[in-house]
Image: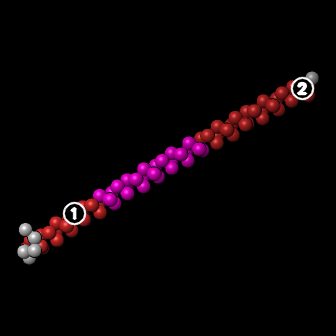
Amino acid sequence: MASKGLQDLKQQVEGAAQEAVTAAGAAVQQVVDQATEAGQKAMDQAAKSTQETIDKTANQASETFSGFGKKLGLLK
């Protein structure tokens, strides 16, 4: 009987250990997912900011060249 009790205890310990490993794996995956999401948001923001800067620079260059064209009488 003692060996049956030890076998049951062993199974309980193994089950608890497996649950702990599964929970730890899920927690690690959640951290990885959050880090990935944060990284993606940062990349999206950087791309948006870069595009806005490009657009502003292009508009300023266009206005500058248009101003030169008007001063030189090339544009109306």
67 on left or right of 43: left
Q: Which residue does the image show at 51% across and 45% down from the upper left?
A: 34
Disc 1 from disc 2: Cα separation: 82 Å
Seen at 64% across and 40% down, the residue is: 24
Q: Is 57 drawn above or below residue 40 in the view shown?
A: below
Q: Is residue 23 left or right of residue 45?
A: right
Mark 1 or mark 2: whose residue is earlier in sequence:
2
Q: Residues within 10 Å of mark 1 (few under 14, many from 20)?
A: few
Label 2 crowd bin: few (<14), some (14–19), many (20+), radius 10 Å: few
Which of 66 and 33 lies nearest the eye of the viewer? 66
Q: Main secondary structure of the magenta part?
A: helix
Q: Position of residue 58 (x, y in %)?
A: 25, 65
Please tell me the numbered disc located at residue 59. Answer: 1
Residue 31 percent coordinates (x, y): 55, 45
Magenta-span inclusion, residue 37? yes
- Secondary structure under tag 1 reads helix
Looking at the picture, which amino acid does disc 1 mark?
A: Asn
Residue 61 rendering spot, x and y as whole percentages: 21, 68
Q: Is residue 74 above or below residue 52?
A: below
From which residue to which does the magenta span run?
28-52
Residue wearing tag 2: 4
Looking at the rendered image, the quarter that the N terminus falls into is: top right
Q: Quadrant of the C terminus?
A: bottom left
Give the image location of residue 8, x and y in percent.
83, 27
